[in-house]
Image (spheres, helix red, strand yellow):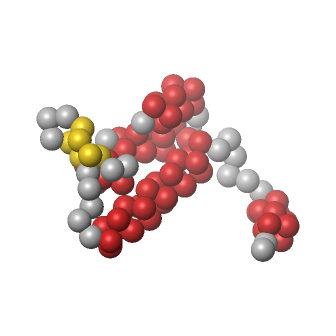
Amino acid sequence: MDLLQSLWLSRSSDAIAGPEIRHLHEEGSNPETLKLFGLCRTNELVAYNPNTDDEVLDCQEGLTRFLIRVMETAAQTKGDSSLQSSSRSTLSC
């Protein structure tokens, strides 16, 4: 949340990234997103422990998706598709 707040302060005037960052910040405060970080809110923040392996995997996948969205939004540019395709060929295993 601190990262999103810092991004909001530095890029709030950005017509594209500003609203996306604000939305991610708001989304990060809701109960479902807090669970992705292993937290739940009662009167205060407490640890959330998933009950099943499926819940653990769902939280990990959801956290990964959320953090990818944060990184994409934080990027100065979305990137050039020609650069993305050339980087794929050099990074293949």
Q: Quadrant of the N terminus?
A: top left
Q: Check the image and name the residue furthest to the left.
A: 43
Horizontal side, residue 82 vs residue 79: left or right? right
Q: Quadrant of residue 36?
A: bottom left
Q: Between residue 22 and residue 54, name the one nearer to us.
A: 54
Specify whether 76 is left or right of 65. Answer: right
Residue displayed at 40% across by 39% down: 25
Is residue 61 shown above or below 43? below
* Residue 85 in view: no
Residue toward you, 30 or 19 = 30
Q: Position of residue 31 (x, y in %)?
A: 25, 49
Q: Where is residue 59? Give x, y as percent.
A: 37, 61
Quadrant (top left/top right/bottom left/bottom right) for the C terminus = bottom right
In-image side of 13 versus 5 (left or right): right
Q: At which x and y percent is residue 52? A: 27, 70
Whether residue 80 can be seen here: yes
Tell me what residue is drawn at x 50 percent, y 34 percent. 3
Query: Furthest residue to the top?
Result: 9
Instruction: Count every numbered label the image shows and give the total.
Output: 0
Front-most of residues 87 and 53: 53
Q: Nearer the viewer, residue 74 or 20?
A: 74
User: Toward which corner of the image does residue 32 lie, by quadrant?
Assistant: bottom left
What residue appears at the point 73 percent right and 53 percent down from the top-left corner?
Answer: 79
Percent position of residue 49, x then y: 26, 56
Seen at 19% across and 34% down, the residue is 44
Where 81 falls versus 16 (above or below)?
below
